[in-house]
Amino acid sequence: MKLLNTDIKNNVLKSMIQILDHEREHIIAANKKDLDAFNKDDQALFDRLIVNNKKVNDMIEAVKAVLSQDDPVGQELSNLTLKNQLNVVNTTAPFGTILIIYESRPDVTIEAAVLAFKANNKILLKGGKEALNSNLILEKCWHQALEDNGLSKDWIKLLHLKREETQAFLKNPPEPLDLIVPRGGERLINFVKTHATCAVLVSGRGNNFLYVSEQADWSKAVNVIVNAKTDKISGCNALDKVLINKNIPEYQLKLKMLQQKLEQHDVTILSDNSVCKVLDSSKKITEDAIWKEEFLALKLLIGEVSTLEEAIDMINTHSGKHSAAIITENTTEALHFMNHIDSAAVYHNASTRFTDGGQMGVGAELAISTDKLHHRGPLGLKQLVTNKYYVFGDGQVRV
């Protein structure tokens, strides 16, 4: 796709803001069709599927936030003049064509597209069939915004492919693909990695851990745990595992206090062998594999550890490398934990629920990357570009 002037891109976004507001009732009505057809047994997916007035407002705010940001394309990263007088300039450049595969959330159809487009990328959207009606009307809104400003609808396109067709598309794409972002669970990520023939940037599962140190403020710990677990169970930044240092003063009493608080929020508590002896009404785990599981439910696994190093080892072994937190009043201990945990985001005395583009000051996000190349954490506007070298000479040859 050709490089677009910043003003043209911003005009498309201004049109989109007006269209989303104008089409609000139709968007919500289309979403109701999806909700009525959905099996509500999967509460996390159902929560992600809902589009109401607040969600439409959030979509509009996401577009406004990207509109207000500087164009990330053509930004100078470095400028060097060598001894041979070659001028080497490194600048940001679009990826080209991005494919994002995601489940349920119609708001991704807005956030992913607005970010990709402003970064001058074409984007192919492969949403789940459960959000078909919602995604169709949102694609229609995008196409109207593009056409109103004299641009091709091809900049933003919804793919209608079944699983087998998606597999064939990934293996032999009918058009060049520069980047694929699978945004979903382990099965989706493995499917894409198996079949893709271009770069894949993984938006990984959560399975987030929190460690409560023996030097923790217990009240602070309880508040953070409850928030991280119950604020939004469908979020990839929700808490799944808590490791508690057994040397905490009044350890058994505090464990029971935590259990009582969590049960007030209808959280089902699972426990390892040691914690189960204290919380006899909790469900004892029978397989170690559960430590690697992302719950996406009102369920929390509590385990006992003896040291900070034991906690770090467990988290690095089992977590999804998304977010991890430590609760401690010892800043030296906190920094040691944060330096040695292999996760996209690490927290000291705060909820993992803040791993989010908007909450971290990035703005709208394409996904939360758990890969280390080319970026880790929220993929915002500045992260949807690659780089390109411009070399200016005057007849120089290498000798």
Image (cartoon, rainbow, N blue to C red):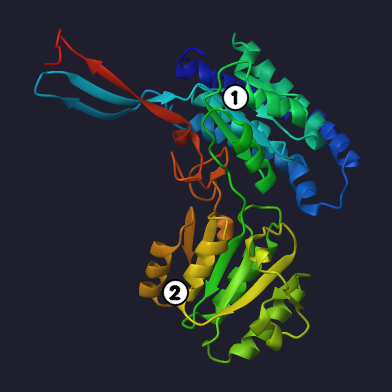
Image height check: is 182 above or below 140?
A: below
For label 1, the SS is strand
Considering the numbered disc 2 on the image, is that residue within a helix, a strand or a loop?
A: helix
Percent coordinates x, y for residue 29 in the rendering:
85, 33
Determine if residue 350 is in view.
no
Task: Report, in whole angstroms, how far the alpha carbon at label 2 lies from the one at label 1.
Answer: 43 Å
Q: Which residue is mark 1?
A: 123
- Residue 384 is tagged as none
**Residue type (three-letter) at the residue carrying disc 1:** Ile
For residue 59, which quarter of the picture?
A: top right
Mark 2 neighbour density, 10 Å: few (under 14) some (14–19) many (20 or more):
few
In the rendered view, does 398 fall on the left or right side of 381? left
Q: Residue at x 71, y 59 (%)?
A: 295
Front residue of 243 and 137: 243
Q: Position of residue 124 (x, y in %)?
A: 63, 24
Choose top left, top right, bottom left or bottom right for residue 156: top right
For disc 2, the marked residue is 309
* Residue at horizontal 65 percent and vertical 74 percent from the top: 302
Question: Residue 393, relative to residue 74: is it above or below?
Answer: above
Identify the residue at image location x=38%, y=69%. 336
> Going by the image, does 369 lie left or right of 35?
left
